[in-house]
Amino acid sequence: MEISIKGLNKNYYSEGKTIKALDQVDLTIPANRIFTLLGPSGCGKTTLLRCIVGLEMPDSGEIAIGDEVVFSTEKGIYVPPDRRGLGMVFQTYAIWPHMNVFDNVAYPLQTRGERKEVIIEKVAKTLHFVQLDGFEKRPATKLSGGQQQRVALARALVAEPKVILFDEPLSNLDAKLREETRKELRAFLTELKITAVYVTHDRIEALSLSDTVAVMKSGRIIELGTPWEIYFDSDRRFVADFIGRANFIEGKVSISEDSFTLIDSAIGVIACEKKTKAAPGAAVIVCIRPEFIRVLKGDHKVGRNIFRGRVESLVFVGDAYEGEIRVGETLLIFRIEPTTAVREGEEIALHFDPRHCSILLN
Amino acid sequence: MQKTRTGLTPGLIAIVGFLTVCPVVMLILGSFSEGLGAFGTFTLSKYVKAYTDPAFAEIIVNTVIFTIGSALVATILALFLAYLNTRTNIPFKFMFRIISLIPMMVPHILFAVSWVLLLNPSNGMINLFFRQFFGWEGAALNIYTLQGMILVEGLLDLPIAYLVIAPAMSAFDVALEESSKVCGASNLRTLVRITLPVLRPAILAAATLVIVRSLASFAVPSVIGMPGRIYVLATHIYRVVATGYVTDYGMAAAVGMSALAASITLIFLYRHLTREGEKYVTISSRGYRPSVVDLKGARYPFFGIVALLSFVLIVLPVLVLFYTSVVPYSMVPSVKAFAMMSWKHWIAVLKDPVSLLSLKNSLYLGVGGATLGIILSFFVAYVIVKVRSKASGFLESLSFLSFSFPGIVVGIGFMWFFVQTPLYATIWALLIGYIATYLPYGIRPLTSAFVQIHSHLEESSRVCGGGPLYTMRRIVIPLLVPGIVSGWILMATMFVRELSLSVVLSRPGTEVLAVQILRFAEDGLWGRLSALGIIMIFISTALVVSASWIGVRLTKGEK
């Protein structure tokens, strides 16, 4: 079911200051896809989620889930969370400690007054789906973090909601479990074909889980696209920086050719394959991710996008070497194959892949 | 919602503020006034009279020896028990839970009385035994001494000290000790240089708390100290207002000021120490268990000590009281004594109108007072935990202000207030005084219960389709029940046994159990005292058992 949000505003007041948690947010969340709200803490992503689910009351605007308007200041509509028919997984899982697994999962059905046999059947089915068969009688708080997380998921799914929402559900798990659970979650959600809204500040989670990512900053959605588009084609420095490690090199547009744009920068002329709206002479920033800087062995290489520099530092991180190269005054981070024979202090040539040099507007 | 909340906080601040600040303000006013009832002109004469009394220096010395002595006894015993429980493989560890909880059911005054019955110089059972079987002249042991007071008070405060030290001991990071041993230190050196210093804040906090408690203690100084003419601050205040021909509430207030000042200072010290302790004690998330010291052959001897201690703390007082209640006069248990047993004292108590009245009053105050108190605590805890504004922070400090104010001093303060109102000499005066003094006992368990209810627990119920009332019934209340029940039990048992506040506020017609027992003790009616005492223990136990039962029913009944 599609969620459409129009002109949503929400302010917080704290110690005499007004904080815009949501600033005129317009958004359409497509049906039956995994949609992620990504941003640093305090960007308003959780507030937006809580407004959709009804735990938070926006100051103005309209929210519709499917055809039903659940909130509108204009029409004076506010449907409380218990009438919205959604499912949600909380950051803390919010497993009720005084109930066992069965009662936790059965709860949404009990609130709807379902018959006992139906409840038992549906709970068993859902627990089977999240691979917790036979856990019904266990006290919920005695489960491991990953299992609790799946109980929370089962509870959110059991009543077959129109939309399921996730508020940083993996942030309480340790790194290895987080990776496993992420893959599981992806599999569950793909199988279900359900509209899922997922809030996270973890870029890897956002990239690997979502069909669509919305990047938020200071209460606004500043970029919307597929994970691929967000990672490679963003034209905002904030997004490029937030979504991954990157080098930013300031420069000026010199020539705009058909297939290349040439940028004058402190380290020399950089050729970018991406087009830019910027006219010649305009100040821009070239963004190149460390994995797209290649190290060339041999002394006399010259050519387009080839620069000379000195390896300032080199750290072996297992699957790669990460390090810094100084080109003139500019320090660039790079990442190369662990088998490449490069030493600290060595003078080397490096090459920027023009397909992955993006031009950001300054 | 927003409106009721904003109204709730100031309302609670007004109520709690009245309850805690009123006695203090009235005490200060009273200490500068001429006489109860009419404040008269400002005068320093009460202070002059109180502090130039030649006997006063001795009272201060007695108080210092008594409080510090009790703190030493209680802390050393608690340290010993906590170490045995958390760090050794001593058998039957459930005993420690009993030791730390059960003594709350035996009122302090009865505990003190049972020691008097055993060790008083004229007809204490142990002394009689020595006289009868060894032909010793006079008294072998005399409880009516400062040492006697210290021993009994120390035993009484042992559970409190244990409850402070044991958690610190079990949270102790053994790696600290292990690394000391790796560095080449011996076991003893490790104990002295590492273990005890790291636990020092907890140990000092426990000792401070016991000092505060024994400073406020009235049962032991009145039952054991007064017959031996050993006066401490609390009994000195009592002597000024309750005995002699001329009662002087102004002078009592002037003396009370120093007791109050001392306890406030000590409570600040205690709070500082507990914060310090939190800084020291590292609780690792790994969930390791402290390594256990194998006591080997000493397991059972050590257990014997623990068993003896629990016998002395729990079984002995009840046995002695019951025995005394059925024999006609003090005698060593013998065939003759068993032949002479009768229900004479029980019948006398049950026919005594004042005893019956005190029974009724205490029961009423226990049940009614605890219920009112817990309702107030519920709202206060709600505001402290869930509202979280500057005002709620203020409410929090206000509500813990009265923690361990000496009851008799609070009583004197309230006396100055109630005299001005129609509440004087009514049961309502006692009720208000009780709730004011014991409010922290209700708020503590409820705040921790509220803290446990993360807002997500309520919110997820809402998202799951539960309305506000449904959420309240199925989520909030069941999670709060344990806190409500333990708060209620704590308050009710405190109220049923309340002595130090009651000796000041209770008037003819509003007698309560503990005061009636004190009267029996003063008159030497040990048989009746014991019968009434057993009834009192029975009531406390019945309250605890029934409240827990209701709690269990409520938690289960939510399905």
Image (cartoon, coloured by chain):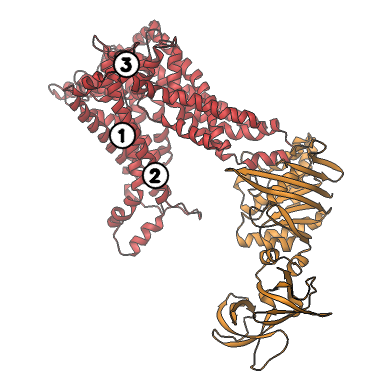
Q: CA distance from mark 3 to mark 1?
A: 23 Å
Numbered disc 3: secondary structure: helix
Which is more foreground, mark 3 or mark 2? 3
Screen quadrant of the N terminus of chain B: top right
Residue beneath disc 1: B211
Amino acid of disc 3: Leu
The colour with which the image depicts chain A is orange
Residue beneath disc 2: B85
Q: The residue marked by circle 3 belongs to what chain?
A: B
Residue lying furthest bottom: A300
The colour with which the image depicts chain B is red
Q: CA distance from mark 3 to mark 2?
A: 36 Å
Which is more foreground, mark 2 or mark 1? 1
**Where's residue B507, x and y in %?**
37, 10
Of the pair A36 and B537, the residue shown nearer to us: A36
B199 over B57 or under it: above or below: below
Amino acid of disc 2: Asn
Q: The residue marked by circle 2 belongs to what chain?
A: B
Left or right side of B123 for B503? right
Q: The residue marked by circle 1 belongs to what chain?
A: B
> Residue B518: which numbered mark, if any?
3
Numbered disc 1: secondary structure: helix
Amino acid of disc 1: Ile
